[in-house]
Image (cartoon, rainbow, N blue to C red):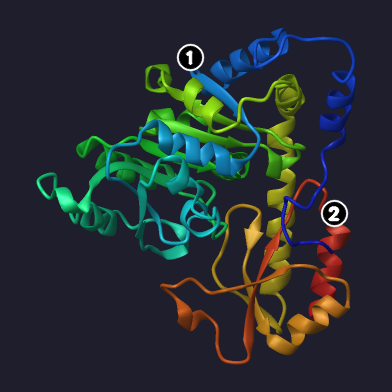
Amino acid sequence: MIFTSDNWAGAHPAIAATLNAHSTGYASAYGTSELDRKVEERFNEIFGREVAVFFVGTGTAANSLALSAVNKPGGVSFCHSEAHVIADECGAPEFFSQGARLAPVEGTEGKMDPSRLEAEIARYPKEFVHGGQPMAITLTQATEAGTVYKPDEILAISKISKAHGLPLHMDGARFANALVALDLSPAAMTADLGVDIVSFGATKNGCWCAEALVFLDPAMATETPFIRKRAAQLFSKTRFISAQFDAYFENDLWLDIARHSNRMAERLQQGILASPHARLGWRCDANEIFPIVASPLAKTLTEKGAMFYEWHPPRSQPELVNEGETMLRLVTSFATTEDDVDRFVEALG
């Protein structure tokens, strides 16, 4: 009953097999092999347009280099107050963008509130040199709260970004989970709604170590080859990242994996809703859910073999968790089984 993180799961067998298949022989280095080119073309097909793709090793690298690519002197990027870029990346986006800052924006269920976003941007008028200047907006899809931005919500933020001349970045560490939850194409969730840059994550969805930075307008990426190299993210044997993506996209494996992990999360939610000993903090759309239980029960669950992280309630909703209670974060993956879920629900009592 391992629900700590989809990062804890291994690699999907098809991904592992492809890595093994490419472990012999020779291929040109630094992203110049035939396999690299094949996968880059596959990204063009997926997004329905020519894109610029840069393979990197971690989601932190993808997010940090995305913001570095649009950096300005005294730059400020706007994100949800509990987004991964501001809460869980140890200042890497600021470090790689030479000190550009992240400005938190509140909103329920992990989503930026457009009116609060407008208000936060207004705190940095162009004529006020001391405050710095807005440089980007970044949203997380799926969110850190297990929810997803609906198309109209993305569009509302996109309109703000365009009105202020700010690039819109999407942190897609769980891109596939959001995509299948919305039943949209990649273009319909991004470019068609005004998203400019995507951190396209695959590691959490069954890959070993595969992330891509995708510019939906290649003209925005002219400096990125140098930014990536300087950040030590230009892998010499890039073909091993490409090989993972090659298997990931084959016969839509990536979507099947995401559908499975989302289904397991929904099965968990239904079990929790039926339990008299737990409740949901909110309804989730993707593969993370946040139940609340009595603190002694949280300990009992671990003693019965369940693994999860205890979680802080959102800053904007501390009242969700009462004294003597604990919020949990449960994350499902390609490796989660119905039996895992059912045993956890049974352990709730």
Q: Provide the secondary structure element on which disc 2 rests.
A: loop
Q: Which residue is mark 2?
A: 337
Q: Provide the secondary structure element on which disc 1 rests.
A: loop
Residue 327 occupies which quadrant of the picture?
bottom right
Task: Evaluate whether residue 252 shows in this view.
Answer: yes
Locate residue 335, reporting x and y percent: 83, 49
Which residue type does callout 1 highlight? Glu
Viewer-side label of 2, 1: 1
Count of numbered tags: 2
Q: Is residue 116 above or below residue 22?
A: below
Locate residue 164, reporting x and y percent: 21, 39
Q: Residue at x 82, y 76 (%)?
A: 302
Q: Residue at x 54, y 53 (%)?
A: 89
Instruction: Rate crowding at label 2 as few (under 14), some (14 to 19) or many (20 or more) other CA atoms within 10 Å.
Output: some
Q: Which mark is residue 247?
A: none
Q: Is residue 24 above or below residue 79?
A: above
Q: Is 288 placed left or right of 320 in the picture?
A: right
Front residue of this view, candidates 53 and 279 = 53
Which residue type does callout 2 highlight? Thr
What quarter of the picture does the N terminus occupy? bottom right
Q: Is residue 301 above or below residue 97?
A: below
Q: Which residue is mark 1?
A: 50
Front residue of this view, candidates 50 and 167 = 167
Front residue of this view, candidates 328 and 35 = 35
Instruction: Rate crowding at label 1 as few (under 14), some (14 to 19) or many (20 or more) other CA atoms within 10 Å.
Output: some
Residue situated furthest bottom in the rendering: 323
Residue 306 occupies which quadrant of the picture?
bottom right
Q: Residue at x 76, y 85 (%)?
A: 297
Please tell me which of labels 2 and 1 falls first in the chain. Answer: 1
Locate residue 111, reporting x and y percent: 42, 56
Q: Residue at x 42, y 28 (%)?
A: 191
Q: CA distance from mark 2 to mark 1?
A: 38 Å
